[in-house]
Image (cartoon, rainbow, N blue to C red):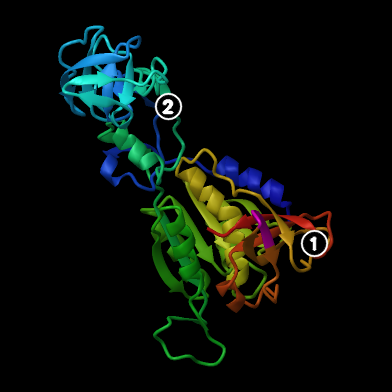
Amino acid sequence: MISWQEAKAILNSLTTTYGTEKISVRESWGRTLAEDITVPRNYPDVHKSAVDGYAFKHGRKTYRLTGEVAAGAKSGPSVKEDETIFVMTGGTVPFGADTVARVEDCEDQDGVITIPGTIPAGDSVNLAGEEAKKGDAVIKKGVVIDKGLYPALFYLGKAEIEVYKKPRVAAFVTGDEILEVEEKFAEGMVFDTNRRILESCLNSVGITPDFFGPIGDTEAEVANAFKEMCKDHDIIISSGGVSMGKYDFVKKVFKEHDFELFIERTRIKPGSPLMVAKRDNKLFLGMPGYPAAFLTNFVFYAVPLFRKALGVTDFENKIHKAILKTEMKARKGRMDIDRATATVENGRYHAADPGSQLTSHFINFASVNALVLIDEDSNSLPAGSEADMILIP
């Protein structure tokens, strides 16, 4: 049994990206940028007006109106010192002009424009290259293309972009007791919950896994499942069969079928069973079977791993500080990861115990949106104290 810090270091050393590909920017939402973005030209490329108004050479009070420039139109002839041209917002400021006055601030008397003397030189002109100059590196690779970056790529005219390929992910759940939700319940059986946890967590990072099973509780079935999934997948996740029970065959299969086993258990609660193995560049994650332990383990260990596999530079879970509204139970000697209901009050996170921390309970996850991290040097934390917290994606 190793510390969670050791487990994280091992997972980071084993996780890689899976190449890159060029795609249309229109299909890039949620992908990870695999190239640094440089500016292809000055932004703006010419001096542009920030308002609808009159472009002129600063220094006079009155000017003769000699024309107009719409957005996207060429500026036309330059203006003389006693002339002005009406320029629409985003239009090119004509050569010879250095200032634009808002139309509502000016007076037009039969083509003679009076400019207020309070307008400073250079006002309302966006200078060529003031946002960025040609060749400037403005976006670094390793960021997820989302609500900010996605339109910025269009703004920069990037029709195609380089992104990291997604790993091919397979998953299966072991256990003869697993039922699909459409099946009739029978005493001692459980409905397949962990597949839905996988779907929701992986979808949050942009991965759609292929599912196999449920796989029966026999060594042959577990070994065959691994063999089949190795053919076309890069990362394989199993749920169940990693503890110490009579029918927990994942560890045995790892050891008897040429897998290199890196992790067996870690000092966290819940979710201590975590098996990590590799064979032929295929990465295997063996997760616990209890849904509460599975979700906790998956968010804490696997979600950052998948972000890194997708090429995300800032892949680790973000740690937030939260004020505890209730006591959070823990025990020295292990990392306790307590489920919590997090709220924002007066600009700060607050976290409350949802009512049970038992690994065998899962219903209260319906209201849980965060996990409170209590390090192995601490006992239970009282209400009112500050704690580290991660949000469930």
Residue 120 figure quarter: top left
Residues at circles 2 and 1 in contact by the CB criterion of under 8 Å: no
Magenta stretch: give its range.
346-350
In the image, farthest residue toward the front: 109
Residue 357: assigned label: none
The residue mark sitting in front, 2 or 1, is: 1
In front: 120, or 127? Answer: 120
Residue in the image at 24% along x and 14% along y:
63
Regarding mark 2 in the picture, which secondary structure is present there? strand
Name the residue: 41% across, 28% down. Answer: 36
At a point 63% along the width and 55% down the height, the residue shown is 390
N-term-proximal mark, 2 vs 1: 2
Circle 1 is placed at which residue position?
384
Q: Please name the amino acid that badge 2 sits on.
A: Val
Quarter location, residue 114: top left
- Residue 9 lies in the magenta-colored region: no
Q: Residue 289 appears at what percent x and percent y?
A: 58, 71
Q: Nearer the viewer, residue 135 or 100?
A: 100
